[in-house]
Amino acid sequence: MPYRTLSLDEAADYLHLKRGELEDLVKHQEIPHDLRGERPIFRQRDLDDWISQRILGFNSKRLNEYHQNTTRRTKDLVAQETLMPNLVQPACLQPALPAKTKASVVREIAAFANQTGQVMDPEGLVQGLTEREELCSTGLPGGLAILHTRHHEPFMFESSFLVVART
C-alpha cells in the first residue's frame, strides 16, 4: 500500500517514542496527523519527512541518543543474522553496465533490478531513484553510487535485495 497509515501505538513504535510523547506532539499540533473520529492516524510518508527535518536540527547529544534508540533492535538482529550475504545473490551482480550518464545509469540499474524478479513496479523504481538523485547525488568518489529511493515503498518490491553494478 503506497500510503500506509499507522495507529498511535504503531507510530510511536516506528518513531521510537513513548506513546505519551507522541500524544503530546499530536495535542500541540507538532506532528503531521489526521483524525478518524477522535483517534489520530499517521501517514508513514509524512512521518518520514517530519523526522528527517527534525533530525537535521538535533544537537550532537540528541542525535547520539536518537541513534542509540533507533539502532538498538538492529544490533540484536545483527548479532543473530548476516544481512548482506543473503541480500546479494550472483544473479544480482553486473560487472559491466554499459551506461555512461547519470540518467542512463538509473534506468539500467532499475532494469537490471527488475530482472531479479523482486521489483513489482519498475517505472516507479526509476521515478523514485530519479527523485532521490535530484535531491542529492548518491555518487561517491571512485565511481561508486548507492542508488536508493527516498522513501521505502514496500508495495514496489517482493522482498529486500541488493544489486551491484559497475559501469
Image (cartoon, rainbow, N blue to C red):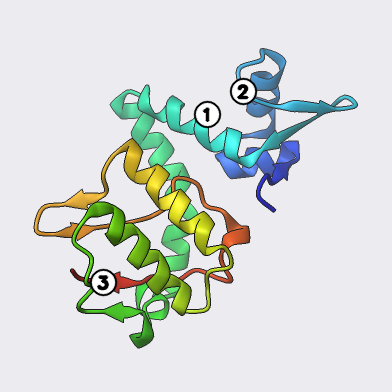
- Residue that mark 1 sits on: 50
- Residue that mark 2 sits on: 31
- Residue that mark 3 sits on: 165
Looking at numbered disc 3 in the image, what kind of residue is underneath it?
Answer: Ala
Location of residue 39 in the rendering, given as x and y in whole percent from the top left corner: 84, 29
Decide which of tag 1 and tag 3 comes sooner along the chain.
1
Location of residue 138 in the rendering, given as x and y in whole percent from the top left corner: 27, 49
Residue 110 location, quadrant: bottom left
Tell me what residue is drawn at x 28 percent, y 61 percent: 105
Seen as rendered, the residue at the extreme right is: 37
- Label 3 – label 2 distance at C-alpha: 39 Å
Q: Nearer the viewer, mark 3 or mark 2?
A: 3
Location of residue 52 in the rendering, given as x and y in whole percent from the top left corner: 44, 33
Give the mark count. 3
Q: Secondary structure at mark 1?
A: helix
Q: Quadrant of the C terminus?
A: bottom left
Residue count near mark 2 (Cα–Cα under 10 Å), binned few <14, some 14–19, many ≥20: some
Question: Do the numbered discs 1 and 2 sit on residues whose CB atoms are within 8 Å?
Answer: yes
Which residue is nearer to you in this view: 78 or 4? 4
